[in-house]
Amino acid sequence: MTTIDLHSEFLRAELFLTSGQPAEAVSILAPVVADYPHDVAVLELLGRACFESAQLAKAEEAFGELVELAPADGWARRALARTLERQHRAAEAAAHHRMADALGAAG
């Protein structure tokens, strides 16, 4: 795919997510993630789509990578914490919530 095609797919995935079709957004994002596995915007959109479609292991992976790339991103920490909570991993989530609080992220 060309860069323009990948950007179009990113925008299409975003549209599907905001239209309440997160599983479709995850599918659409596959080639974008393959070409841009460390892109912050791609990882955020993928994490959100996975979280909203209850693909929690994939959401954790995306948000975890996002935290590694941008450790001072409070939003990413909060998203990872909420994903861990949905997997009944409160102790792990608490550490990320504390960091998100320290970074001033909305709760």
Image: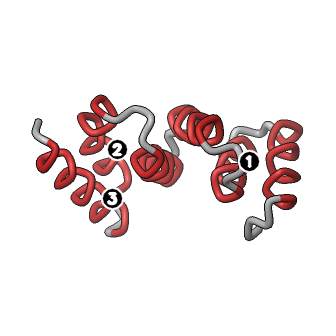
Q: Distance between the residues labelled 2 and 3?
A: 9 Å
In front of the other: 89 or 46: 46
Crowd rating for badge 3 (residues with CA inside 10 Å; few <14, some 14–19, many 20+):
some
With 100 as the anchor, is 54 left or right in this view?
left
Residue type, numbered disc 2: Val
x and y percentages locating residue 27 in the rendered image: 28, 41
N-terminal of the pair, mark 2 or mark 3, is 3
Q: Nearer the viewer, mark 1 or mark 3?
A: 1
Q: Name the residue under label 3.
A: 21
N-terminal of the pair, mark 1 or mark 3, is 3
Mark 2 falls on what kind of element?
helix
Q: Name the residue under label 1.
A: 81
Residue type, numbered disc 1: Ala
In which quadrant of the rendered view does residue 8 lie?
bottom left
Residue type, numbered disc 3: Gln
Q: Distance between the residues labelled 2 and 1?
A: 20 Å
The answer to whether 89 is drawn above or below residue 100 in the figure is above
Q: Which residue is depicted at the point 28% across and 65% down?
A: 15
Q: Quadrant of the C terminus?
A: bottom right
In front of the other: 31 or 49: 31
Q: How far apart are marks 1 and 3 (CA)?
A: 23 Å
